[in-house]
Amino acid sequence: MLDCFYRLIAACSLLILCHCCIISDFVLNINWQL
């Protein structure tokens, strides 16, 4: 049960991390265009 819970947390944190990287890339691209 706990193992599954920790896997869920790890997956969510990875997803959030990837999302943040995508957003920062997007912001950088906008800054380069300005």
Image (cartoon, helix red, strand yellow):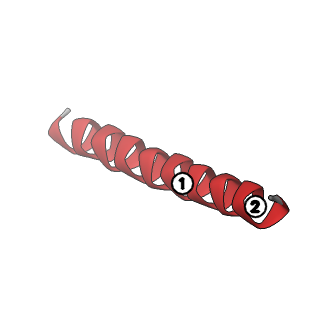
Residue appearing at x 39%, y 41% in the figure? 23
- Crowdedness of circle 2 by 10 Å Cα count: few (<14), some, many (20+)? few
Relative image position of residue 27 (x, y in whole percent): 34, 38
Question: Quick one: 3 or 29, which is closer to the camera?
Answer: 3
Relative image position of residue 15 (x, y in whole percent): 49, 51
Helix, strand or loop at label 1? It is helix
Question: Quick one: 23 or 4, which is closer to the camera?
Answer: 4
Task: Establish if 6 lies above or below 20.
Answer: below
Task: Establish if 10 lies above or below 32.
Answer: below
Q: Amino acid at mark 2?
A: Tyr
The image quarter containing residue 11 is bottom right
Q: CA distance from mark 2 to mark 1?
A: 16 Å
Q: Please identify the quadrant where the N terminus is shown.
A: bottom right
Residue appearing at x 33%, y 50% in the figure? 25
Q: Nearer the viewer, mark 2 or mark 1?
A: 2
| Disc on res. 6 | 2
Residue where numbered disc 1 is placed = 17
Q: Please identify the quadrant where the C terminus is shown.
A: top left
Residue appearing at x 24%, y 35% in the figure? 30
- Crowdedness of circle 1 by 10 Å Cα count: few (<14), some, many (20+)? few
Q: Amino acid at mark 1?
A: Leu
Helix, strand or loop at label 2? It is helix
